[in-house]
Image (cartoon, rainbow, N blue to C red):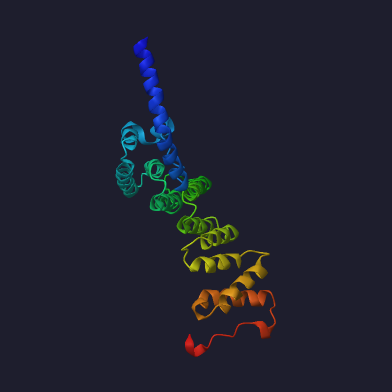
Amino acid sequence: MTRVFIVVVSLIGFGLMKLPAEHAIEMQHQQEHLRGVEFNLGLREKIGQLGFVAALSGFRAIVADGLFIQAHVAWERTEWGRVLLLFRQVTTLQPRAILFWDIAAWHMGWNASVAALNDRTQPRTALRIKAQREYFALAKDFLESGIKNNPDKPQLYESLARLYKEKYKDHQRASEFFAKAAALPRAPSYDRRFSAYELSYCEGREREAYERLRQLYDEGKKERLPTLITRLKFLENKLDIPKEQRIPDADPLKR
């Protein structure tokens, strides 16, 4: 009984000593938005026993890189189910690696979706389109999860905007996510323009789009790009803007 008592007291003491360090680590993880790595049975199921042990041992980056290489090989073999599984493992292990989320979404939203639509083994067009849209949804899920883990980085917002634009043909959502990217520190200047471009295709939002495009135009020559001028002139005609308020026509000699 004495030995048991000593062991219990020792364990309690050790646990109390660990609390400040564990709290500090947890706070650091929250600050770094490390929401995606929880060392539990769910993670073990996702990455397997060997990967789980390696992750616990502090080798998450090495395991993730190895799985990423496997995913690349699976992509070359067009093994889309395996590509999906491996990228889920990779992003679970390294949720702060933007590249992994972005490439996972690209494989699902562009490569796998095209393969599904052109699948000659499926004679029914409706089922091919359904499979294509399922891959769109997987791409969106990767990007949304990536944003949750990296809310301060513009790249994944941009990728989600492109997904809405090119795959869902949803210009309003595309505009929203380009705007979210533009609001972040160190965002590229083109995010503001792209947000306004996408808004200009939205029925009922033409006036807002016109004002945003005109504001960009008035900022100077660096913003007066061909696409911006084309969309601005389109909106001037659609909104019947008075001639004296319109931007000048381009000089034919400078085209």
Residue shown at the point (58%, 85%) measured from the top left: 249
Nearer to us in this view, 159 or 134: 159
Above or below, 114 against 12 in this view is: below
Residue 45 in view of the camera = no
**In x, y percent, where is residue 182?**
52, 63
Q: Specify the farthest residue to the bottom.
A: 253
Looking at the picture, how far across and down is residue 176, in whole percent? 58, 59
Which residue occupies the extreme top position in the image?
1
Observer-nearest residue: 167 or 181? 181
Q: Is 236 on the left-hand or right-hand side of 80?
A: right
Q: Quadrant of residue 201?
A: bottom right
* Percent coordinates x, y for residue 231 in the rendering: 58, 73
Task: Give how far across and how far down residue 62 sits, in percent.
Answer: 29, 44
Q: Can see residue 7? A: yes
Q: Which residue is depicted at the point 46% across and 66% down?
A: 188
Q: Quadrant of the N terminus?
A: top left
User: Position of 244 compared to 70: left or right?
Assistant: right
Position above or below: 236 against 12: below
Figure disc tally = 0
Q: Nearer the viewer, residue 193 or 251?
A: 193
